[in-house]
Image (cartoon, rainbow, N blue to C red):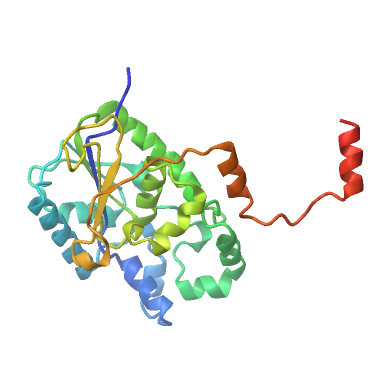
Amino acid sequence: MTHQLPIDLVIVRHGQSEGNLAQFHSKIGDDSLWTEAFQGRASRNYRLTDVGIAQAKIAGEYLKKCGLGTFDAYYCSEYLRAMETAGHLELVDSHWESEFLLREQDMGILAGKSSMQREEEYSHELDRRERDKFFYSAPGGESIASCALRIEKWLQNLRETASGFRVIVVAHGNIMKAIRLRLEKMTTREWSKFSDDPHYLTYNGQILHYTRRNPITGKISNNINWFRTICPWDESKTPTDWVRFERPIWSSEQLLEWCDKTERLVNNTPDEEEEVLSTS
C-alpha cells in the first residue's frame, strides 16, 4: 500500500523565546541577560517572552482568518517554547500530541552559551562550523543532517497515520529547515537559501504551509508540490505567494558541472597518472 503525506501540512515556528532574546542582546555586545540562573537552565525549558506570546496569538488569528482554524492532527515539540506557542495559537478543539522527534537541534557544548561566550571560548568550533554548516556538529551535539534524518522518521509516521489529513506542527527554526530539506529534497549546497532567499527566511512565529492541493485548480496530487510562507506579525518580511517547487534530478553532465564549481586542490603528476593507469 502506498502511503501519502497529509494534504495540508502547516508548520509554525515558536514565538520569541528567552533564548532568542538573550542571544539577540549578546550579538550586539550585551550579555547582561545571561545570568547564572539563566545559563543553568536547559534550553528545552526556555519560555516565551511577552513578544513571543503576542507573535503566537497573531499567528493563531492569521490561521483562523485563512480558514486554517481546525486540523485533523496537532503536533508540537516537547520543548516549552513550542508547547507554549501551541497553546497561545488558541485553536478551537485542538488536541496536541507532544513529539520529541520535533525537538530543536542539539547544540552540544555550544548550548547554554551566549554568542559572545561562544566567540571567546569556542572560536575553533565556530571556524569548523563555518567550513560546513550542514554537516557540522558541535561536540556532544548534532548536525542539521542528523536532524533531517530524525525528521524523516516523523514524516514517515505522517505517511502512515495522517495521509489525506490536515496537520499542524509547532516546532523550531532549524527543524523547520530540516523539514524543508526533506520535503523539497533540497541539496546541501542550497543551504544558503535559508540566509538570503526571502521564501526561506524563518522568523519567530513564522507559518509555513505545504499542500498537495493545487492552489489554482484545486486538484490534489500524490506529492506535496506547493508551499507558501508567512510572517503574520509583519507580512512584508517574506513573500506570501504560493510557490511550486520541483525536486531536483540531474543528468551526468549536470553532475559533473556541479562538481566543477569546486576547485580541485590536489592532483596526480603526469608520471603518477601514467604509472597507475598502466597497471590497472
246 with respect to 12 (left or right):
right
Image-based side of 1 in relation to 150, left or right:
left
Look at the picture and state if 189 lies above or below 7. Answer: below
Q: Quadrant of the N terminus?
A: top left
Q: Does residue 142 appear in this view? A: no
Q: Could you tell me residue 250's position as x and y percent?
A: 51, 39
Which residue is more in the foreground, 191 or 261? Answer: 261
| Position of residue 21 measured from the top left corner of the image (x, y, whole percent) | 32, 71
Q: Position of residue 261 (x, y in %)?
A: 61, 54
Total count of labels: 0
The correct choice, above or below, for 166 with respect to 29 in the image is: above
The answer to which quarter of the image holds residue 8 is top left
Identified at 31% across, 29% down, the residue is: 159
Q: Residue furthest front?
A: 253
Quadrant that contains the C terminus:
top right
Quarter of the image where one finds residue 31: bottom left
Is residue 4 something one can see in this rendering? yes
Counting from the top left corner in percent of width and height, residue 233 is at: 18, 65
Left/right placement of residue 177 relative to residue 205 reads right
Instruction: From the viewer's side, name the closer residue of 202 and 124.
Output: 202
225 left or right of 167 in image: right
Name the residue rendered at 84%, 49% in the picture.
268
